Image (cartoon, rainbow, N blue to C red):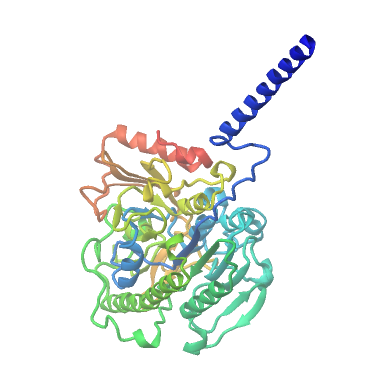
Amino acid sequence: MAGLTTRSGATRTRQRGVFAALAFLVLLSGSLTCVRCAEPEPRAKPSNILLIVVDDQDLALGGMSPMKKTKALIGDAGATFVNAFTITPLCCPSRSSILTGRYPHNHGVRNNSLSGNCSSSQWQKGPETETFPFYLSKQKYQTFFAGKYLNQYGQKAVGGVGHVPPGWDQWHALVGNSRYYNYTLSVNGKEEIHSDSYEKDYLTDLVLNRSLNFLDNRSPQHPFFLMLCPPAPHSPWTAAPQYQKDFIDVKAPRDGSFDKPGKDKHWLLRQPTNPMLNSTVDFLDNAFRRRWQTLLSVDDLVEVLVKKLDSLKELNDTYIFYTSDNGYHTGQFSLPIDKRQLYEFDIRIPLLVRGPGIKPSQTLQAPVLNIDLAPTLLDISGVNLSSVNVDGQSFLSQMAPSLRNGTARPFFLVEYTGEGSPTGDPSCPKLGPGVSECFPDCVCEDSCNNTYACVRTISSEQNLQYCEFADTESFVEMYNMTTDPYQLENIVKKVDPAVLQAMNQRLIKLQSCEGDSCRDTK
């Protein structure tokens, strides 16, 4: 009996130990999750994204004035960046920078020609395979494109309309440069020819209507990304019929550098007739009005899309970006109409953003570049930015500090490679081939030696621009943007040599930067 009692006591002791262990595990399970047996939590669906990129819309000359709905529905509902810049003031290299997040010296697109790598075979085999839509598609985004892509897109020599860049589920891309009627589209790799019917063909409205159709037929299980690139306000400035009498009394602004001589500037700014001929002024005033007229259809596009997203109950989970590829000038320094120059009117662009975590009615001062769009969109989608090759940086932290931590850059690069016509140009004598606008007074707007690089600083300590030209003169321009916002006085001969040297060294580093080194704040 004694032995039996001993065994039964040992058994009870072991049982108590087992029960105690089980009780501990039960207690522990109230605060910890069993790693092996628990189902993994599903990853939250990333937010939707809508990116609208217009063509040649300035900021410095009041280009946003016609956009009352856009300012209310995006800017007032989110953030307005007052120091947004393109890193190159020309369509194709700028759009290539938007798509890749890289400076032109890293994506290789120099101008609007095939020889300048605009939608060339080299572009298609290289940088185009690493654009942000490719990464968004890997994140299960449903992707849609409509409108102008790159100026030379669709050329037969580089794949024609059958070439659809990687990353796009739906592709409705304009062949060639901006037009409003009588154009050809690549629709998912098939040719689609359009005529001049407003109801069927007006490109801004077609971009809108096809995006609405995409939204109606998308899968609700996955996020969506739309990139819409209407032609406005690019020439030929063809407004919708209902807007062709708007702004009839509007003229180009006469303040700032309008019709001022290009004193102490690069030769291209010294060669226009000054003051401008009356015929030139009349032409640029008409262009200015018509540009605004074309933007009214874009304003309608924004309104309709915001209402559509609201009706689909997707508005509060969609980031909406509105911007332009470059600025524009109409009479500044007696240059009638174009872009391509280093001055604020050509490099400043509108940028408005609304979306989750962005408080309304924010006006943000920190400089933001168009190469920052790609990393920002990828940041929103959940892509690890250290895994992608970009020169820009996400500005999500500036718009929505609760979502990210980050710092603004104190300086950045603007670079441009001059473009010339192969036959030469009588308005650019002895200076090589050039590019003119004849309307009716030929004025040279660009040349092969209009090739420059600038470093721009915007901070509480400095607001400067320093530029060097790649020409036989090694011409240099420098401006104090605080005291001279219209860049009327080139101070290169007055400034402290130590400041000049510091700007020169900073420019040298930026011109060869890549990736992280482009974001160096020292």
* Nearer to the camera, 72 or 173: 72
Q: Is residue 487 above or below residue 58?
A: above
Q: Is residue 520 above or below residue 258?
A: above
The N terminus sits in image quarter? top right
Can the viewer see residue 319 in this picture?
no
Q: Residue at x 36, y 34 (%)?
A: 502
* Nearer to the camera, 36 or 371: 36
* Nearer to the camera, 245 or 139: 139
Q: Residue at x 46, y 60 (%)?
A: 317
Horizontally, residue 300 falls left or right of residue 459, namely right
Can the viewer see residue 346 in this picture?
yes
Q: Residue at x 48, y 71 (%)?
A: 312
Q: Is residue 262 above or below residue 200?
A: above
Q: Position of residue 54 (x, y in %)?
A: 43, 68
The C terminus sits in image quarter? top left
Q: Position of residue 476 (x, y in %)?
A: 36, 46
* Nearer to the camera, 249 or 317: 317
Horizontally, residue 48 falls left or right of residue 306, namely right
Q: Position of residue 223 (x, y in %)?
A: 55, 61
